[in-house]
Image: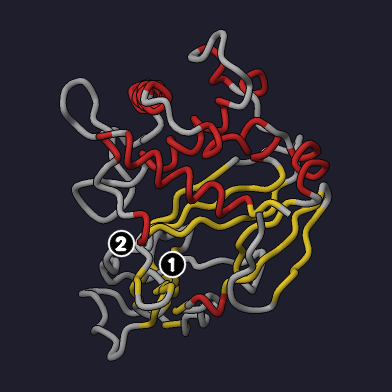
Amino acid sequence: MVNYTDRIAVLMEDIVARVPELSFIDMSRVLVFARGGRSGREGAYATCHCLCLPDSEPGYYFWRSRSTGELTRRSQWFVTRSPQVRVGTTPIDYMVSFSLPRFCDQTLSSTRKQVHYRGDEQWVAKLDTIVHELYHIDPARPGIRRMERSDGTYAANCHGTRFFEDVVRMVREYLATRPDPEVFEFLRYDFEELTARFGGVVGTAFRGFPSYPQRYADVLEPQPANPPGVECPVEPLKASRYARAFTEDDLVMREFLPQGSRQLVRKGRYCAA
């Protein structure tokens, strides 16, 4: 069976080695994993997740009376933290997830990307998505890259016209270096073709699938004093259902099917073609 997430990771390593604008990325600190996503359904093809964000400022949830505007109750103070993910001794700063089999069936004609790639083969849409997610990694600070407007201020939407144009340019730059076709050959096939060619599609996932590491709220101890003029009932914050630390033992291999997936190995790394 073809290990799809490993193939993407190898391709990403080749991309960052050939595209100067992405050369700052240390792929040993980027984890590629698979999430479920049926073809033909709405949803993202891939997502970049940042694990190196600092803790948030302390805060609390609160409720106000619609009639008086006064606080009627609030939660305990908390901060939002990023989970720790390590593979061996290496801390992971970013994860990139791919929705399978949806990503495998992505084509230029099924997205708005076709206006940028007139005359290109359909599989280039997948290469564009991979470069797109790598471009989200910020070279200057922990977090997702912020895009500037023409006046130099930051745009709230990181998916502006400039972002898409930059991605297209980097895709062109990568292909112009004449990479080994074997590195990206797997992108040429849709999910049905991959299954027929390799006997199945597998990918790295987290043991708690469909769950994966996400930021969580942590109650502050000791609790700060009430803000001036705020006197209302304080409700305990519900314990976060998200785990706080992950290792390679939390990674498993799943086989992805047209209508679902199944776990193949409970722990460790599963080797596929």
Question: What residue is rendered at 80% in x and 55% in y?
Answer: 260
**Residue 86 badge:** none
Callout 2, which amino acid? Leu
Is 211 or 97 nearer to us in this picture? 97
Disc 1: which residue: 215
Residue 234, image x, y percentages: 42, 82
Residue 85, image x, y percentages: 42, 72
Question: What residue is rendered at 72% in x and 34% in y?
Answer: 190
Q: Is residue 224 left or right of residue 232?
A: left
The image's colouring method is secondary structure
Is the Cβ of the residue at disc 1 closer than 8 Å to that at disc 2? yes
Residue 124, image x, y percentages: 55, 25
The picture quadrant where one finds residue 133 is top left
Disc 2: which residue: 53
* Crowding near the residue tagged with mark 2, few <14, some 14–19, many ≥20 C-alpha atoms within 10 Å: some
The picture quadrant where one finds residue 76 is bottom left
State the quadrant of the N terminus.
bottom right
Residue 256, image x, y percentages: 75, 54
Is residue 242 placed above or below 12 in the rendered structure?
below
- Residue found at the very far left of the displayed protein: 152
Callout 1, which amino acid? Arg
Q: Earlier in the sequence, mark 1 or mark 2?
A: 2
State the quadrant of the C terminus.
bottom right
* Crowding near the residue tagged with mark 1, few <14, some 14–19, many ≥20 C-alpha atoms within 10 Å: some
Q: Secondary structure at mark 1?
A: loop
